[in-house]
């Protein structure tokens, strides 16, 4: 079977496997991890060996299949949640393959080791990393396929391969053409060429990369045909909703299912670790059943959870020394020498992700297999937890990744919370069950962006430049206590808590600085939320810099230019945004201008905003955004992601907040957990900095700058410095002169 | 009871208070209409009843028995409604979950107002939430759809 297992292992090159043991099943290109490495923690890309195709024509670990029906199928090792990889990754393959774009189909790959993230070692989607991490691998798969097709055509025509060319899904020999579909079977029988002989296209020859292509998932998403996890249906599938403790950490005391079971359509009521599951023929019946359930909970240790108390506790913590995250010189001593100091407290609330598709997970358990259908960002973690619960091996857990109706990090829990629960429900029910969360379950179900309080004190010299910088962050660690902790927490510091501060060019550019962190435990489950630590650190840093500029009597852009003089990528983004915005021209009457620039996930984004205040309401009219993400693979998609990140961040800047009282989350749905709506969306102009620098991400970097850009604009307009999100004007500033 | 959906008669067994959304999705297998909130706050469940837009998550089946119901699946054959064409042309969608509702709301708007202003669009579509922020492209696509519909 694995006839090439004796091939010496190398980590320095990417070998591509070609499969083709069964004649007539087309050409398949992929990666396979050899048996010896299968259980190693994959820190490096998997080492490939050829694998046989099963009779059905399905090959494990395929990235690309070319059928003899001329269909080119791209398998995605990452999950499409709107960020556009359903189109961008196929572009990479199609570019090298010279594919016919109209023949491309896309699927989510199954869960398997070959699909592990090239940089992070497990199958996952997050960190705005898919495109840069797959840039070589997907192009290589396309190039490998092209090389084999050329070879097959050369044999068919009895001419040297070098005399042939490829174009639009065919190999061309003068006036003759052979479509890839006609060559696929023959190509599958050829010996895999040495990957070192593959030559990728010169960028000047790119037709797709740098230019873009129409989204491949549009047709199904505009006709209602696209299948999300919520849409999974099959014979015998039941639906469950779970009654969970109203207070985090609460315990089930007892329940009475009599009334619930009497509801038409309810089949069963079972206890699971996370609560009581009502299992029914369909969602409506399950929901009615749960409403009829009588349940008693013990509130547990967090019964006193209260927003005001959390805030005051965090402020108290911010006044005492924490764990050092960054330090140089003697900040306290340097502060004493400052001509002027700026001191402030900033705060941001706990936030729900609230993706449009409420959480759901379908599970079918049989004696030696477990099938899961869900929109997940964390396939490997899901396999591991499902294996633990069912007693099966991870390889026996099949994950069918559906389209995600929004992820934003909620579908990437290190402990796979909603998958764990769904597996328990199916196991307890002894039937296939789709566990569905209502919107209320989602808003109240935890795994929030943590709330933070920060204290900062910056000392300026006579020129107004910072010479001493002290900052303390107080907020929960996302990864402490999870399986990720060994990789993200070092010396008591969770890197995701301090990103954007501990590595800030302003902080590191100030000779005497000290950044400290407190990571309190509150009982509230927390999680990454689009842009993670940058979601609040961008707000704090870019508001603070604005305060410093004001204290120094300088223009916000001019001030940043001085501090960022050794940071050309920040400068390029800042300058492009300022130029396109028309920074420097006086604002129209009743309008204020603000700007922010922040690096996150490898990209540099600046945003300038124009705001007004009408009847006490903040209105954002226009945002000009500039991003340096290195090579811009799919420009229109980059712009779409900037629009997306801005909308997401703006809703949080203006409206969203979770509050706790007597242990319980007060908000429950979109009527009181407010997010941005169409009529509140500003005009957005997004520009891409021409850049040949290292590629960064685009999914998250558009979010951090919007809150500070708007806060800074409000300051310019009203003179009121707002340091708490969501931004709330004091009545005095509600009607500016 | 009989429900008339996308030009076909369906015989469904449902309690009179069952929301149309769940009858469509779970009894008739029409999963194009989406569940987002259950309280008519997000618009993902928007369908047409006798041509008018309606939030199916709060509409009991008993209220629409005998009426002409159109879902996203029935808006056009093969996605060729001007709104769908404009959506495809401008690459509006991202995750896509809200888009059935957005498209149904937009189609209902254009049926009533063939050349809507930005304000008309705001008013008609602000009940449809998009967490992916496709709002700028939705606005542009509604204008484009109006132009396409004009011919």
Image: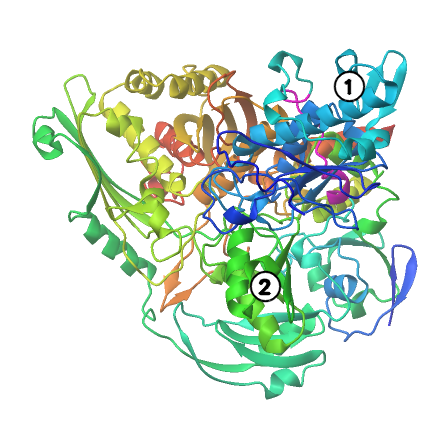
Give left or right: position of A213 versus A451.
Answer: right
* Residue A327 at least partly seen: yes
Q: Quadrant of residue A686?
A: top right
Q: Which residue is mark 1?
A: A166
Q: Position of residue A447 (x, y in %)?
A: 44, 57
Q: Element under label 2?
A: loop
Residue at the spot x=45%, y=48% of the render? A41
Residue A107, labelled with which disc?
Answer: none
Q: Quadrant of residue A90?
A: top right
Residue at the spot x=45%, y=70% of the render? A246
Q: Quadrant of residue A192?
A: top right
**Residue at the outermost right position:** B8
Q: Position of residue B29 (x, y in %)?
A: 79, 61
The subunit carrying tag 2 is A
Q: Position of residue A253 (x, y in %)?
A: 43, 83
Residue at the spot x=76%, y=76% of the render? B15
Is A103 located above or below residue A304 in the figure? above
Q: Which residues are magenta?
A: A208-222
Query: First in sequence: mark 1 or mark 2?
Result: 1
- Given residues A576 and A70, the one toward you in this image is A70
Give left or right: position of A97 versus A504.
Answer: right
Q: Which residue is mark 2?
A: A438
The subunit carrying tag 1 is A
Magenta run includes residue A130: no
Do the residues indicated by labels 1 and 2 lie within the same chain of the protein? yes
């Amino acid at each position: 079977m694995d006839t090439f297992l004796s091939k010496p292992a190398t980590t320095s090159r990417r070998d591509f496997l070609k499969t083709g043991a069964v004649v007539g099943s087309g050409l398949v290109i992929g990666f396979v991890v050899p048996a010896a490495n299968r259980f190693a923690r994959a820190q490096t890309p998997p080492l490939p060996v050829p694998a046989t195709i099963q009779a059905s024509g399905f090959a494990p670990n395929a990235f690309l299949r070319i059928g003899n029906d001329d269909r080119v199928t791209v398998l995605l090792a990452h999950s499409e949640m709107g960020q556009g990889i359903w189109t961008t990754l196929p572009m990479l393959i199609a570019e090298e393959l010279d594919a016919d774009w109209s023949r491309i189909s896309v699927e989510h790959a199954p869960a398997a080791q070959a699909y592990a993230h090239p940089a992070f070692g497990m199958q996952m989607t997050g960190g705005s990393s898919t495109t840069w991490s797959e840039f070589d691998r997907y192009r290589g798969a396309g190039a490998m396929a092209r090389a084999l097709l050329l070879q097959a055509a050369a044999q068919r025509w009895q001419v040297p391969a070098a005399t042939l060319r490829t174009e639009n899904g065919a190999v061309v020999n003068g006036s003759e053409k052979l479509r890839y579909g006609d060559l696929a079977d023959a190509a599958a029988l050829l010996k895999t060429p040495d990957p070192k002989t593959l030559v990728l296209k010169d960028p000047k020859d790119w037709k797709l990369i740098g230019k873009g292509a129409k989204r491949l998932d549009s047709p199904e998403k505009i006709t209602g045909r696209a299948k999300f996890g919520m849409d999974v249906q099959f014979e015998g599938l039941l639906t469950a909703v779970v009654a969970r403790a109203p207070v985090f950490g609460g315990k089930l005391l007892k329940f009475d299912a009599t009334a619930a079971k009497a509801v038409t359509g309810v089949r069963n009521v079972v206890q699971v670790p996370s609560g009581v599951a009502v299992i029914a023929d369909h969602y409506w019946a399950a929901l009615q059943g749960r409403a009829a359930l009588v349940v008693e909970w013990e509130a547990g240790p967090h019964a006193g959870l209260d927003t005001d108390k959390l805030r005051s506790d965090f402020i108290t913590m911010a006044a005492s020394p924490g764990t050092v995250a960054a330090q140089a010189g003697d900040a306290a001593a340097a502060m004493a020498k400052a001509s002027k100091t700026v001191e402030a407290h900033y705060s941001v609330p706990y936030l729900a992700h609230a993706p449009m598709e409420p959480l759901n997970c379908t599970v079918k358990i049989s004696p030696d297999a477990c099938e899961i259908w869900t929109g997940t960002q964390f396939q490997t973690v899901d396999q591991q937890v499902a294996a633990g619960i069912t007693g099966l091996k991870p390889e026996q857990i099949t994950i069918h990744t559906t389209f995600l109706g929004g992820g934003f990090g909620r579908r990437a829990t290190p402990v796979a919370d909603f998958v764990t629960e769904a597996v328990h429900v199916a196991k307890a029910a002894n039937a296939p069950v789709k566990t569905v969360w209502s919107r209320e379950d989602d808003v109240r179900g935890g795994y929030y962006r943590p709330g933070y309080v920060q204290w900062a004190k910056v000392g300026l010299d006579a020129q107004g430049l910072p010479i001493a910088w002290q900052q303390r962050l107080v907020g929960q660690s996302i990864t402490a206590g999870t399986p990720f902790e060994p990789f993200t927490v070092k010396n008591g510091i969770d890197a995701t808590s301090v990103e954007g501060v501990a590595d800030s060019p302003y902080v590191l550019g100030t000779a005497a600085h000290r950044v400290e962190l407190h990571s309190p435990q509150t009982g509230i489950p927390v999680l990454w939320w689009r842009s993670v630590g940058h979601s609040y650190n961008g707000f704090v840093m870019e508001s603070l810099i604005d305060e410093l500029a004001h204290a120094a009597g300088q223009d916000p852009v001019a001030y940043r230019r001085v501090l960022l003089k050794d940071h050309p990528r920040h400068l390029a983004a800042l300058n492009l945004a300022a130029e396109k915005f028309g920074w420097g021209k006086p604002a129209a009457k009743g309008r204020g201008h603000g700007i922010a620039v922040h690096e996150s996930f490898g990209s540099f984004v600046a945003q300038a905003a124009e705001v007004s205040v009408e009847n006490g309401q903040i209105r954002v009219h226009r945002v000009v955004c500039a991003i340096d993400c290195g090579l811009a693979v799919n420009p229109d998609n980059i712009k779409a992601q900037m629009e997306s990140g801005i909308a997401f961040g703006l809703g949080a800047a203006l409206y969203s907040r979770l509050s706790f009282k007597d242990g319980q989350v007060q908000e429950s749905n979109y009527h009181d957990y407010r997010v941005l709506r169409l009529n509140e969306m500003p005009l957005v102009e997004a520009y891409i900095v021409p850049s040949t620098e290292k590629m960064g991400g685009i999914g998250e970097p558009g979010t951090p700058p919007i809150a500070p850009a708007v806060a800074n604009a409000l300051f310019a307009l009203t003179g009121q410095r707002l340091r708490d999100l969501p931004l709330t004007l004091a009545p005095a500033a509600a009607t500016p002169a | 009871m009989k429900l008339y959906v996308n030009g076909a008669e369906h015989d469904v067994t449902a309690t009179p208070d069952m929301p149309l959304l769940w009858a469509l999705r779970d009894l008739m297998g029409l999963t194009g209409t989406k569940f987002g909130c259950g309280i008519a706050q997000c618009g993902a469940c928007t369908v047409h009843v006798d041509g008018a837009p309606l939030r199916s998550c709060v509409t009991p089946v008993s209220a629409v028995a005998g009426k002409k119901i159109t879902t996203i699946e029935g808006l056009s054959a093969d996605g060729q409604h001007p709104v769908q064409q404009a959506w495809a042309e401008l690459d509006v969608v991202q995750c896509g979950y809200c888009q059935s509702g957005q498209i149904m709301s937009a189609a209902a708007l254009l049926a009533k107002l063939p050349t809507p202003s930005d304000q008309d669009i705001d008013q008609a579509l602000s009940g449809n939430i998009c967490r992916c922020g496709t709002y700028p492209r939705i606005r542009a696509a509604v204008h484009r759809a109006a132009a396409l519909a004009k011919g």
